[in-house]
Amino acid sequence: MTLTARVIACLDVDAGRVVKGVNFVDVVDAGDPIELASGYGAAGIDELLFLDITASSSDRETTLELVRRSADQVFIPVTVGGGIRSIEDIDALLRAGADKVSINTAAIARPELLREAANRFGSQCIVLSLDARRESDQPSGFGVTTHGGRKSAGLDAVQWAKAAQGYGVGEILLNSMDADGTKSGFDLELIQAVRVAVDVPLIASGGAGVASDFPAAIRAGAQAVLAASIFHFGEVSVSEVKDALKHDSIPVRLPTKLVS
Amino acid sequence: MTPTVAVLDYGFGNVRSAMRAAEHVGTQAILSSDFDTCLNADGLIIPGVGAFAACMKGIDKVRGGSLVDARLIANRPILGICVGMQIMFAQGIEHGIRTNGLAQWPGVVDRLVASIVPHMGWNSVTPPAESTLFAGVESEWFYFVHSYAAQEWLMSDTDGYQRPPSVTWSEYGTPFIAAVENGPLSAVQFHPEKSGDAGLALINNWARTLV
């Protein structure tokens, strides 16, 4: 019995549709979220992340409805992130059927939100989403960014990860803004730097290009690996990623197709 | 006749997913905090996430302890999920503070001893051959997300049961109890409602025991 490495598909959602920005600039429509979610479920994905990239207040209900429909049809864990600012936002998403929520900007503005959320809903469902990039003036060499990597938050990424764990987050979604969209592999230095500082699970995100990129991220210390566009556009399949992990002696879940 | 399954609504747990999973396997699911509704349904699912102490407060508010006792006396099946399983043990310890559980089983739910906590993700289990819940999915993976677990089974096989409790183990850092089947009382530490086809098959196995 061994905990398997998780393979996560990220679906960037805008007004009920899945989009993925290359370096967060140009967005391309990659399909219906529920259709994609069901397809990923059947393909053996271990978890789904819905990232609400607009998250304007008028789209809030659209997102909740999408989470409800997804939770009704796809019986695997779903995390929702993007624009979460309050305990009420978290409550609404969890009630809609989300298993976890990922919090980014609002936690930078007010870290106590993480503590309040963890106390109220449990650490297991509170994920810190951390957008990091190389900043030479930070002690670890990595800084925290906001606005999709465009602005510096003036925080050390490793220190922030450590602080967030102290506030009670149960997991960290570690996005490398340097690697994002490059398809040149995960940011192994970033994963290693955060791994040694925290003991909650880490999801490596940003930079995946080919199946063989994934085992390296797990070896660097991540418990889960995440990708978006390469999955959506069929450049790499979930089973190819799992085969690559297995080939590198990393335990994975290979579900038998069951009749239920 | 379609069996009815009440999902206990006491403020904790992903009740929506538990409802849909129960419906998916052909039961009529009802979300309720009403004592009689939950007592009289063919099956009762007790979900639960978060802290043991907080969940016990919620359970007390809906007279969950009496509900569990009343159902078990009447031999009516219960399925506890995650913290809904943990509260069946005698006590939970969080940050050094002990909270009494429903004490259907002896033992303490304590923090997992592992380098990375929570235990989050898909793990395998070792069900005993006589398991009903795991029939056909013995070798599958199930989705866990928890920082605490019962790590010892203290009930003796010869404690006067017609059929000894069936205990399924998993391992994360140390061995812990992944599931217990004890007459009408079943419970799983993982989330079958989030464990894909394997989880649905397990819920289906449970639903087939309902009359």
Image (tube, coloured by chain):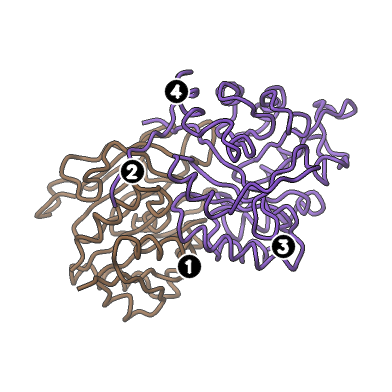
Chain colours: A purple, B brown
Cα–Cα span, label 3 and label 2: 35 Å
User: Which mark's residue is nearer the viewer, 2 or 1?
Assistant: 2
What type is the residue that disc 3 sits on? Ser
Q: Nearer the viewer, residue A245 or A224?
A: A245
| Location of residue B29 (image quadrant) | bottom left
Contact, mark 1 vs mark 4 (Cβ under 8 Å): no
The answer to whether tags 3 and 2 share a subunit is no
Q: Position of residue B110 (x, y in %)?
A: 44, 45
Q: Position of residue A235 (x, y in %)?
A: 59, 31
Which residue is rendered at x = 28% and y = 54% of the image?
A: B105
Q: Count neighbours of disc 4 (C-alpha within 10 A) and say few if under 14, some if 14 to 19, many if 20 or more.
A: some
The answer to whether tags 1 and 3 share a subunit is no
The answer to whether tags 2 and 1 share a subunit is yes
Question: Which residue bears the numbered disc 3?
Answer: A86
Question: Which residue bears the numbered disc 2?
Answer: B177
Q: Against B48, is A217 above or below?
A: above
User: Which mark's residue is nearer the viewer, 1 or 3?
Assistant: 3
Label for residue A246? 4
Q: Against B90, is A174 above or below?
A: above
Chain of the residue that carries numbered disc 4 in the rendered image: A
